[in-house]
Image (tube, helix red, strand yellow):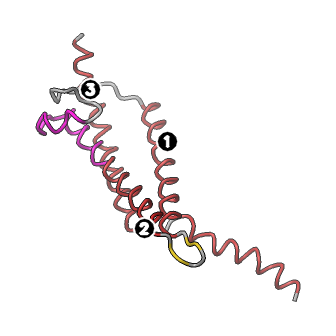
Amino acid sequence: MTPVFVVSLPISIFADLGQYFYQDWEFAKWIGVAVAVDTFLGVWKHMVRKDASSEAFFSKFCKKIVIYILLLILANVLSHVTVNGSAVGPTQWIGTYICVFMLVREAFSCVENIQSVYPIFPASFVKRLKDFNEKGEYKLDEEDQA
């Protein structure tokens, strides 16, 4: 009986470990598409501005991917945590919020990149984004002119 226990216990721990990493693969596909679109637009923006740097790109991109993976794991844990066998409602809400935040942040980043390449959004909309001034103009253009 002891040999079975010695082998089955470690296997059961590792087999069960997968549920803690991430489970919502449908959302992972959507955030992956958003990151891919944002990355393409970001590269395009830097090519147009002639300030592209592969070192900065890979550093920022790798940091973003690692942070997003950790946030997805955290969202999964918060969405599925149980206390005394019951799901905890507030943590489910926080897990959902983390996922929505990531998707909205990618959408804002796409808008910033599009606006810097080809300004099509109203100034009143983009002035709230981090790369734009109160007039809705791309900040780096002002620095280049000064």
Residue type marked 2: Trp
- Pointer 3 residue: 49
- Horizontal and vertical percent for residue 94? 43, 59
On the picture, is 137 further left or further right than 58? Answer: left
Q: Residue at x 35, y 29 (%)?
A: 52
Q: Name the residue under label 2.
A: 25
SS at circle 3: helix
Q: Distance between the residues labelled 1 and 3?
A: 23 Å
Mark 2 to mark 1: distance in Å? 21 Å
Identify the residue at image location x=52%, y=58%.
74
**In the rendered image, which residue does mark 1 sit on?**
63
Q: Residue 111 appears at what percent x and percent y?
A: 23, 42
- Give 96 or 70, whichever is nearer the viewer: 96
| Quadrant into which the C terminus falls | top left
Task: Give the mark count.
Answer: 3
Q: Depth check: give the residue in front, 92 or 18.
A: 92
Task: Tell me the tag on residue 77.
Answer: none
Label 1 residue SS: helix
Q: Decide whether residue 115 is among the magenta residues.
A: yes
Q: Mark 1 or mark 3: which is in front? A: 1
Most extreme residue toward the top, as rendered? 146
Q: Which amino acid, mark 1? A: Lys
Comes first in the chain, label 2 or label 1: 2
Residue type for callout 3 = Arg
Is the residue under label 3 in contact with that under label 2 (CB below 8 Å)? Answer: no
* Quarter assignment of residue 51: top left
Answer with left or right where residue 74 lies relative to residue 120. Answer: right
First in sequence: mark 1 vs mark 3: 3
Please, what secondary structure does the residue beneath circle 2 have? helix
Q: For the magenta stretch, what is the residue range?
A: 106-128
Above or below 117: residue 87: below
